[in-house]
Image: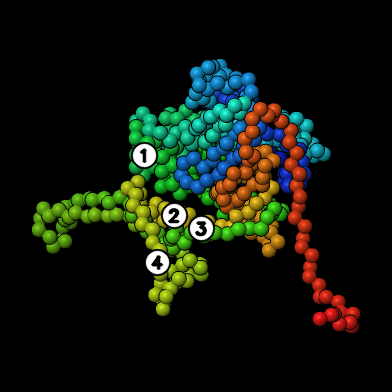
Amino acid sequence: MKNLGLTSTQREAYRERIFSTHDYRVNATLLTLEEKPVGDLSVLDGQINFQTGNGVRRTATLTISDPAGALDFTGAQMYSGSTVWLDRLVRITHSIKVPGYGINLGHGADVVQVTCFIGPPSTISRDGAEVTLELQDKAALAMRGSKPYTVPKGMNARTAIRNILANCAGEFRFKLGTGTRRLSKPYSVGWDDTASPWAVAYRIASAELGMRLYYTTDGYAALRKVPTASSFTVPHVLDQAATSMDFTTVDNIVQVTGKQATSTKDAAKGSGLPKGTTITKTTQPRATAQLPASNPLSPQALARKGVPRYLPLLVSDDSITKTSQAKTRAANELGKDDRLQGQPQYDVIPFFHGDVDDLVNIRTPTGLHTVRLSTVSIPLGVGGPMTIGTQRWVSRAPRLNVKAWQVRTRTVHKPKPKPKKTAAKHHGKRGRG
């Protein structure tokens, strides 16, 4: 969950405001790759999406008003010489006013501004007066192969991640924390996409630290374990929850096998072996994680005639050289597979300070439910609700020759509780028939 720089009282006031009727402003700014502003974009509509995976976790779609054709990406100059926008980033911010709480964060009196997306364009298209941008988060800048670069065995693991992203992808914003864990082996970036800066840095985060590498909403390369506690509560839903489950993706036991290593040594005196005998020893780290019997997807819970039903996932990774690393990987993979297979789908009032994989509580007519922000669509306009548990087109359909609006009003209609059923009154008279 993004730290807004507010006191606890101000934070609660902000949340109360965003889940009630309010005016808000969405701004999109064109940036250089050094994240310096070069121009503002006139936003008509759009949405931000969260998705699962190990790479780009956040995408966005923007519809921009450009009736004069100033954004001619086909060859003319765009904002100081950019021709195809490969050398530009787009930053999206959401602002609302929370009066009466003395908030002063440099965005205006009582204004809370959240940077909810920053990243490069992946595609650009024009339809008359409107330009549509599809964007990816900053992980996209490091997902292609790069000039060979190696971090040596014994280097601090967090320093290694920083050095790879800084020296191979030019990253300069980090929230990696501190730690003493050192690399158990060297790691190398190369020209192939499987050895890209992001792939190697992500591998270090997972194998060496048991953590997840991702980009925050405001563009910092960050490390954290997958959250296990809820960040805040969404006070109500806008529609009944829908639930779906794909049973073919469920695993209830994970076995992780690391790199096989061979060592030789001379037989010790007194071992009974002939002099000069060489002993060869082969080792290979291996670990298994299994859902507990109390879990409804465990082998015991799915047993038939007392025979457990196993749904195995086998992982082989040569970057794992220690049993402790194999144990961590097995636990992470098991948690990943069991975590969200049956997550309900909710429509809620849009909020913008949540980050990928955050846990939030959602208050529904049937009680409080905890869900993870892994598959999400957040509208930037007023075309639809925010969806959790599924991605949906929640921005409006494009239309031509429309002037942009900067201040929008989100009107919130809180669901009314259904009236309780009461027994029919009898007045002693029989009805006809």
Q: Label 3 amino acid?
A: Gln
Would you identify the image quadrant in which residue 243 lies?
Answer: bottom right
Q: Could you give the CA–CA distance between mark 4 and mark 1, rounded to whole angstroms?
A: 31 Å
Residue drawn at point x = 53 percent, y = 17 percent = 76
Residue 79 point in image, percent of width and height: 57, 19
Can see residue 181? no
- The circle drawn on residue 341 is 3
Image coordinates of residue 128 in percent, x first then y, are: 59, 26
Closer to the chain start, of discs 3 and 1, is 1
Amino acid, disc 1: Thr
Q: How many marks?
A: 4
Helix, strand or loop for disc 3: loop
Decide if residue 199 is on the left or right side of residue 36.
Answer: left
Q: Residue at x 86, y 77 (%)?
A: 425
Give the residue at mark 2. 333
> Mark 2, mark 1: which one is toward the viewer?
1
The quadrant where residue 423 appears: bottom right
Mark 4 secondary-structure assignment = loop
| Label 2: element kind | helix
Q: Earlier in the sequence, mark 4 or mark 3?
A: 4
Q: CA distance from mark 2 to mark 1?
A: 20 Å
Reading the image, the residue beneath label 4 is 310
Tell me the residue that label 1 is attached to.
Answer: 194
The type of residue carrying mark 2 is Glu
**Of the residues shown, which amino acid type is indicated by label 4?**
Tyr
Q: Position of residue 361 (x, y in %)?
A: 65, 55
